[in-house]
Every structure is written in C-alpha cells, then in structure tokens.
C-alpha cells in the first residue's frame, strides 16, 4: 500500500468515525399531529355548609362599626350571641375575624383600627364562652374595601368585621365572609 493510499484510507476512516451519523428524515405527512388530550381529574363537589354554618354566615353579615370606633352595636352583639350559641353547640366550628376600615386615615392607623375591631369581636366571643383556640383575628385595615367611592354609604360598608368559618377538618367554607 502506498503512502498516499494509506493516508486516504486513514482520512476516510477518521471521517467515518468522527462524523455524526446521518439520520434519515421521515417523509412529510399530510396528517397534522393530533393534539394530546389532557384529562383533568374530576373536581370535588363544592363543600356544602351545614345549616348551622349557613346561619352563622347570615348573622356575621351584620357586624359593622361607627366612624373611628371599635365598639360593637346592639345589632352586632345580637348577631354574635346567636353565633356563640351555635359554636357552643358545634365544637368543630372555628372562626377567623378580619377587621376592616374605610379609606380615611393613614394605612398604619387603619390597620390598627381594623385590629381593634377584630379584637372587640374576639373579646366579646371569649366573654361569652368561646375558646381562644377557636377564634383568630387579623386586620386588613383599608386594603379590602367592599364598596368603592368616597361617600358615607361606601365608608359605612367598609367599616366592618368579616369572618371566615371553618368546620370539621375542612377548609374555609366559601361565601362565609360577612359585613
């Protein structure tokens, strides 16, 4: 074998070894790729609140406050009394009280006022016999208005306590915020 031929053969072998393999392209198809069907698991039916929890929702929708105040009105106390009675009968019910304020005042002031309102509800419920382990409080100040605008009507709707009710080992019941 001559040197030229040996070099040519070596170059050919090196080219075959180092070159990427050729892939044959599939012939084009007239049928488009079928979309992959994604089947979502069936949704659990919405949790239906028992009648006693539904009654609590209605009662809690009546807890409002006067301007710059955290004093419970007579109507608020009546609603809370009814809910305390339900909570004493059904020990698996828990409540989160969310204090709110209208937009007047500074953010810090309104957070403090919302906290005072939530605390007023908490203190009232504790005085009536509800365990502290069943009620928690949080303040949202002016951050979660239910009514927009700068009228007294809008302000009055935003000066409130809202409630999230849970029962059993479940998650919060939908539609349980009030007032």
Image (cartoon, rainbow, N blue to C red):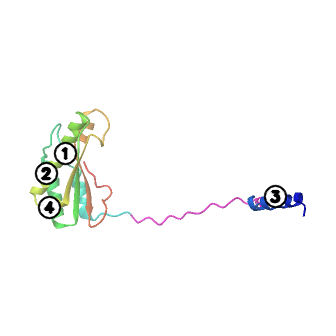
SS assignment at label 4: loop
Q: Which sits earlier in the primary sequence, circle 1 or circle 3?
A: 3
Q: Residue 11, labelled with which disc? A: 3
Say left or right for 30 vs 54.
right
The residue carrying pointer 2 sits among few (fewer than 14), some (14 to 19) or many (20 or more) residues within 10 Å by Cα, namely some
Front residue of 148/169: it is 169
- Judged by depth in the image, the label closer to the viewer, 3 or 4, is 3
Say left or right for 10 vs 117.
right
| Principal secondary structure, stretch drawn in magenta | loop
The residue carrying pointer 4 sits among few (fewer than 14), some (14 to 19) or many (20 or more) residues within 10 Å by Cα, namely some
Q: Is residue 70 above or below residue 26?
A: above
**Magenta region:** 24-45
- Is there any visible trace of residue 27 in the rendered image? no
Spatial CA distance of label 2 from label 3 is 96 Å
The residue carrying pointer 3 sits among few (fewer than 14), some (14 to 19) or many (20 or more) residues within 10 Å by Cα, namely few
Q: Which sits earlier in the primary sequence, circle 2 or circle 4?
A: 2
Front residue of 163/82: it is 163
């Amino acid at each position: 074998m001559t040197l030229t031929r040996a070099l040519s053969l070596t170059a050919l072998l090196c080219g075959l070894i180092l070159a990427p393999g050729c892939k044959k392209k599939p012939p084009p198809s007239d049928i488009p790729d079928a979309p992959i069907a994604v089947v979502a698991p069936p949704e659990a039916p919405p949790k239906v609140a028992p009648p006693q929890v539904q009654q609590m929702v209605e009662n809690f929708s009546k807890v409002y406050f006067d301007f710059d105040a955290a004093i419970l009105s007579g109507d608020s106390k009546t609603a809370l009394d009814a809910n305390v009675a339900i909570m004493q009968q059904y020990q698996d019910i828990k409540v989160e009280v969310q204090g709110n304020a209208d937009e007047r005042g500074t953010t810090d002031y309104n957070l403090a006022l919302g906290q005072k309102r939530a605390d007023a509800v908490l203190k009232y419920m504790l005085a009536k016999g509800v365990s502290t382990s069943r009620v928690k409080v949080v303040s949202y100040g002016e951050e979660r208005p239910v009514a927009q605008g700068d009228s007294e009507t809008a302000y009055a709707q935003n000066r409130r306590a809202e409630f999230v009710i849970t029962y059993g080992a479940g998650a919060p019941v939908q539609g349980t915020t009030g007032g």
